[in-house]
Image (cartoon, grey):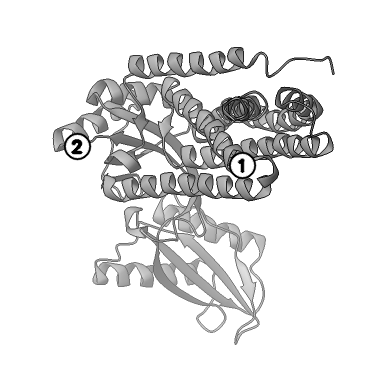
């Protein structure tokens, strides 16, 4: 590549980084500081069922923020709910009527129509299925199984009377004696049609609050606002509504553990570089690498804050990911510096660093572009599908990946060269 004096332009590179950090700090002050997630800050979570998934998360978020004056995060979800699962009692209890007609031969089409007409006239708006046949003591049993809520099962006298009427009237309808066609009836409870799967749509509202939990009035106001927005009545049905307070203690412990993990990872990286690059004063290389990593983390943090992304577990994951990418490029550059210093000990520090950066520049930028292409596709996909969690993870990774390349190529080796030059002049 064209000869570029990277070391000679290091003041420009350092100035760019310092300017970005200063602008970021100004932006941080303007936006009022970082936004902590409800897990780290505490607050309340409200889940409310909606009739469909045709709603805007941003509209609900703005609505609740204006109502409470607090940091609000809104997500939506949908899932299949089988009403034969738990919480059946929230659905309408229906009665399943069983009718078995024992006969020497299958019912004719005319007899089937008569039975259907009779049952519809008897019980009103019911769906009468085609009879199912199976062998029993007699050659055939015509089996009808149908929902029939008109049967008064709570009144045993009335129920027995209706069952007897059905048996007698069906025998008479089919014009046969009891020996030829026997009619049996029974009932059981069901909760909706068998294996009925309904689609449930939920809006998940997380209201972060450091000072106190939501009051009953605030909870009622949120429920009423969403009810008016979608013209629904927010019920206390456990399938369609759930409320819980979130304590920040566990989240803060997780945040502390995450920051400790970042610190431990950085320390081990310094130790590795110290040992790996003893030939070029490994400790100084490790310290300069750590400064470059700190540079990346600070810029990522400022990006999170300025774009009002929530500091949550995704932030810790993004930071750890960028630490890995950034240190990888840094090690590549320092490894080339070590090789070039061993090959020509008479070459100056400045020339050695310039040569090493030029030799590794193409490799580092190709690696970075490959990662960036994947992250950009992920970000576009998440944005198009309103996947805010993935957006908050992918966008800072894009920024962090660019910063990692910049610090690995332009910051860490130049800091190391500056240190070595000053150490040489003192000697």
- In depth, the one of 276 and 21 nearer the eye is 276
Residue 279: x and y in percent read: 70, 44
Tell me the tag on residue 198.
none
Q: Nearer the viewer, mark 2 or mark 1?
A: 1
Helix, strand or loop under label 1: helix
Q: Identify residue for label 2.
A: 214
Q: Examine the image and state in which quarter residue 377 appears.
A: top right
Quarter of the view holding residue 214: top left
Residue 211 is left or right of residue 374, and the answer is left
Image quarter of the N terminus: top right
Quadrant where the image shows the C terminus:
top right
**330 sits to left or right of 217:** right
The first of marks 2 and 1 along the sequence is 2
Residue position marked by numbered label 1 in the rendering:
324
Label 2, label 1: how far apart the Cα atoms are: 40 Å
Which residue is at 60% across, 12% downward? 12
Q: Residue at x 44, y 73 (%)?
A: 185
Residue 330 percent location from the top left of the image: 66, 35
Which residue is at the front of the view, 272 or 283?
Answer: 283
Q: Is residue 273 above or below residue 175?
A: above
- Residue 102 is drawn in which quadrant? bottom right
Residue 323 locus on image (x, y percent) = 57, 39
**Where 259 falls versus 127 (above or below)?**
above
Question: In the rendered image, is residue 168 in sight?
Answer: no
Number of dots carrying numbers = 2
Is residue 169 among the parts visible in the rendering? yes
The local crowd at label 1, few if under 14, some if 14 to 19, many if 20 or more residues have their Cα within 10 Å, is some
The x and y percentages for residue 237 are 29, 48
């Amino acid at each position: 590549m064209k000869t570029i004096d990277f070391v000679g332009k290091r003041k420009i590179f350092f100035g760019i980084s310092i300017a970005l950090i200063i602008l970021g700090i100004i932006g941080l002050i303007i936006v009022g500081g970082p936004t902590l997630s409800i897990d780290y800050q505490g607050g309340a979570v409200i889940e409310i069922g909606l009739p469909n998934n045709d709603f805007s998360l941003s509209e609900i978020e703005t609505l609740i923020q204006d109502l409470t004056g607090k940091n609000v995060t809104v997500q939506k979800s949908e899932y299949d709910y089988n009403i034969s699962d738990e919480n059946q009692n929230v659905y309408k209890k229906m009665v399943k009527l069983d009718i078995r007609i024992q006969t020497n031969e299958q019912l004719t089409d005319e007899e089937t129509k008569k039975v259907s007409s009779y049952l519809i006239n008897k019980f009103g708006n019911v769906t009468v299925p085609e009879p199912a046949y199976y062998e029993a003591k007699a050659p055939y049993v015509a089996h009808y199984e149908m929902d029939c809520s008109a049967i008064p099962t709570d009144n045993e006298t009335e129920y027995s009377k209706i069952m007897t009427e059905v048996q007698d009237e069906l025998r008479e309808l089919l014009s046969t004696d009891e020996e030829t066609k026997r009619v049996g009836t029974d009932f059981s409870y069901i909760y909706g049609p068998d294996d009925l799967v309904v689609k449930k749509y939920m809006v998940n509202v997380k209201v972060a609050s450091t000072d106190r939990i939501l009051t009953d009035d605030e909870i009622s106001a949120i429920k009423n606002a969403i009810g008016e927005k979608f013209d629904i009545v927010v019920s206390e049905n456990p399938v369609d509504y759930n409320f819980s307070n979130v304590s920040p203690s566990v989240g803060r412990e997780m945040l502390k553990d995450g920051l400790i993990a970042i610190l431990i990872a950085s320390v081990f990286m310094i130790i590795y570089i110290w040992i790996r690059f003893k030939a070029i004063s490994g400790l100084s290389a490790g310290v300069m690498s750590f400064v470059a990593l700190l540079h990346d983390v600070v810029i990522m943090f400022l990006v999170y804050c300025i774009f009002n992304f929530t500091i949550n577990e995704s932030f810790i994951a993004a930071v750890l990911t960028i630490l890995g990418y950034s240190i990888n490029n840094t090690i590549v550059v320092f490894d080339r510096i070590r090789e070039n210093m061993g090959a020509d000990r008479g070459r100056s520090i400045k020339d050695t660093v310039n040569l090493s950066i030029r030799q590794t520049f193409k490799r580092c930028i190709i690696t970075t572009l490959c990662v960036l292409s994947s992250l950009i596709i992920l970000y576009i996909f998440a944005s198009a599908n309103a996947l805010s969690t993935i957006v908050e993870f992918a966008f800072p990774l894009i920024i962090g990946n660019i910063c990692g390349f910049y610090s690995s190529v332009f910051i860490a080796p130049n800091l190391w060269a500056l240190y070595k030059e000053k150490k040489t002049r003192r000697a």
